Image (spheres, coloured by chain):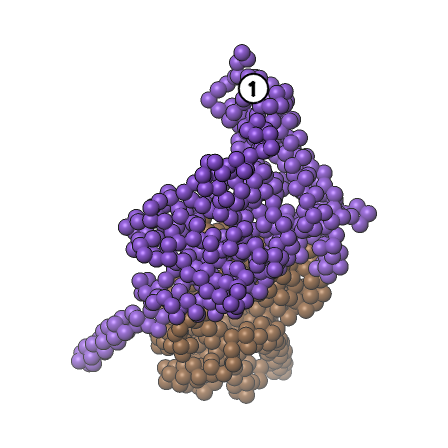
Chain colours: A purple, B brown
Amino acid sequence: MKLKHELRRIIIVLICSSVMLTMTGCFDQREIDDLAYPLAMGIDVGVADNLRLTLQLAAPLSISDGSGGPSGGGGRGGGGGPTSIITVDAPSIYSGLNMINNIISKEINMSHTKIIVFSKALAEKGVKLYLHALHRGREFRPDIYVAVSTDPPDQYLKGIKPTLESSPAKYYELMLGKDFTSFYPTVRLNSFYFKSESDAVEPVAILTGLSTYNTVDDLKKAGSKAGGNEIKPEGHYEAGNIPVVADQKNEFMGVAVFKHEKMVAMMNGLESSCMQLVTGEYKHAYWTLPDVYEKDKIVVMNIFQRKKPVIIAAIKNGKPCFKINLDLEGDFTSIQSDINYEKYPDVMEKGASEMIKEEITAMLKRTLYEFDSDICGFGRYVKSKFLTWAEWRKFDWENQYRKSSFEINVKLKMRRTGLMIRSIEH
Amino acid sequence: MPNRIKFGKWEAVALLINAISTKLYLYYPRMTVEDAGTAGWILSIYVSLVTLMIFTVLIRLYKRFEGMDILEVSEICGGKVLKTLTGLITVGVLFYLTVITIREFSEDMKVISLPTSPLSFVMLFFIAGMIIGGFLGLEAIVRYHAILVPIISIAYILILIGAVKLMDISNIYPILGTGAYDIFGKGFFRISVFGDILMLFLIVPSIGSYKNVKRIGYTAIGFSSVFLTMGSLAYILSFPYPSNLEPFLPMYQMTRLITYGRFFQRIESVFVFIWATAALMYLTANFYFMVYVLSRIFDMKYIRPLIMPCAIIVFSTAFVPQNLVSVLNIETNIFNKLIWVITFGYVGLILIFANLRERAKRRSEKDETEA
């Protein structure tokens, strides 16, 4: 009996040991070092084939030894940089990956991809054909950022040379996930996909491009006709034409507007802020506002969205009407005139509210009459007026949106004045 | 029940909660959306209420048969023949459930984590768990449930809390989804979702008094209803209709969307763990009951000789469905629409006839005494 018990114990130990030893490297065992991780993927209209696929591959060893600094640069096609660029013309995304696997030694794994960059040309042609593949793929994360580049993605990805981070992956995460600028929205693959499938909201993408200016002398081209005297607020630019000279050539600014799966227009940074104010995705940003009394001077405010916007939808005489209530608050960060707005903020509050209202109205008018695309998702509010899906479909929101009217109320309250409590008039 | 093993109320509740709620991880949220669109969560509440009502009727009918399982009640009702028939039907249901679920879980696991592993290799782990569970017996199975179901439930609730950020209230509109008929008419058949309550009628001898059975039934259905409805609602709020008809593993895909800053990402790895645990426990329990009922049909003293042959049959049959889509179709369009006929209809009929028989028997006994 004792012997039987001992034998049983030995058998169990043998089974456990053999399982532990043999199951460690099962069919799906893959060494991290055997895989190549693209950090960015560019999709463009191909020449040799349907599609031009560009991958920005991470070179982990260069990233870890810090050679990705300003001199290291990215996109040098290998040879010590933190990234390597590879471009292929292929019939589809996966066939492109298949072809790239014939060129590089490591297996491509998309699970660390941070951004997908569509070229403007492809976005205008339609991205639906590729969206399904991205959404279906197990390795593509739903939180990948989606951008449209004004430059061809192969050129664009070569221009990405993060100067402050050794890891390009961190660069994308910090750059595109930040709260302190509203000049471009945060757009991730899942929301882009859902919106492209939805009949209550249209998708948008981050607008990006390479800077057109290489030296400060080139900035003359960007100036206003009146030279340096005329004030052009910082939000009035789109990616690619921001008057900036930097080591880093790529820039993000504005919104690529889609109708279903096709890009129909671009909006600038200010319009992007307005859009986010309406959708409630806005966090805070500096706003340059003209001084109410001294028109040649400006007041800069850091404006926060205190509460999510309250949007009330109604259908009057068969036409959709929306009442948009925005609750904002702001801090003075710069008052160029010596007017004591700190003591009497009402004037500036009213002026800023009016300006924001005008900008939002202008943006919404563009969405109605120029794009005919409900990028702010007003359809989501109208849907609640219907009991069943069939009734909602019958209403045909897509063709009703352009009949919409808006009533915008902006409530802006000044809260803080920075480290100065008053402006002394000289 | 072998040697009439006794276990507590919580163990039984945990067993039933896991059996009913495992669907959450597989297809349930998507199924509610397929049925009722944006009103899937209303369908879920409706189905839960109908199930509670039907269960109330069933449990009242059970009052006279304290301590007896459904096979014993069948014997009272129609002798050995009905007992065998009930046993065969129960085995059929459990076999079907085990086969479909093991195939589905293995396919899902292959898609998510083990794409290059052969299906048989993935399935082997579940089969091994089922066999071990079978050998260890019911007591071990229910004790595992008692420990792990609370952990799985907490993890599930944490996932739902994590997904709050993704939720958009406008996704539940239009409030009646695809229409009232789809919810309250066609939706009735979805009481099949609670078909696993059948297990309760098999563990009665281990639970004890009628009061316990009643309490366990209500608690399990109550908890499961809350979990199922929460899952359906969270899914509908997170994924807009009709895009939410597409994901093949709704909860998994919802978990993939959860990110908090740059640190809390890829939460689905936790999900895979709790999902695999729940699956393994569910399959083990199902398989055990299948073998146990089989042994009862043949009046066998031990169930162990049946474990290996049954495991091989389950393993082989699991390869019969052609692909994942056909497995999902069988599960949602056949099992989850029709199984109520057995769980509630057939069991109800047996209980009604058993009650009539019992009443007639008592009356004749009374008449004999008076005579």
> Residue A150 location, x and y as percent?
54, 51
* A15 relative to B338 in the view: left or right: left
Q: Residue furthest top?
A: A426
Amino acid on which disc 1 is placed: Ser
The residue that disc 1 covers is A337
| Residue A80 seen in this snapshot | yes
Examine the rendered structure and indicate whether residue A231 appears above or below residue A339: below
**Quarter-of-image position of residue B235:** bottom right
Q: Residue furthest right?
A: A317
- Mark 1 falls on what kind of element? loop
> Residue A61 location, x and y as percent?
29, 55
Examine the rendered structure and indicate whether residue A175 appears above or below residue B346: above
Question: Few, some or many C-alpha atoms within 10 Å of disc 1 (few <14, some 14-19, many ≥20)?
Answer: some
Residue in view at x 53 percent, y 65 percent: A47
**Quarter-of-image position of residue B303:** bottom left
Q: Tell which of B169 and A313 is nearer to you.
A: A313
Residue in view at x 58 percent, y 72 percent: B332
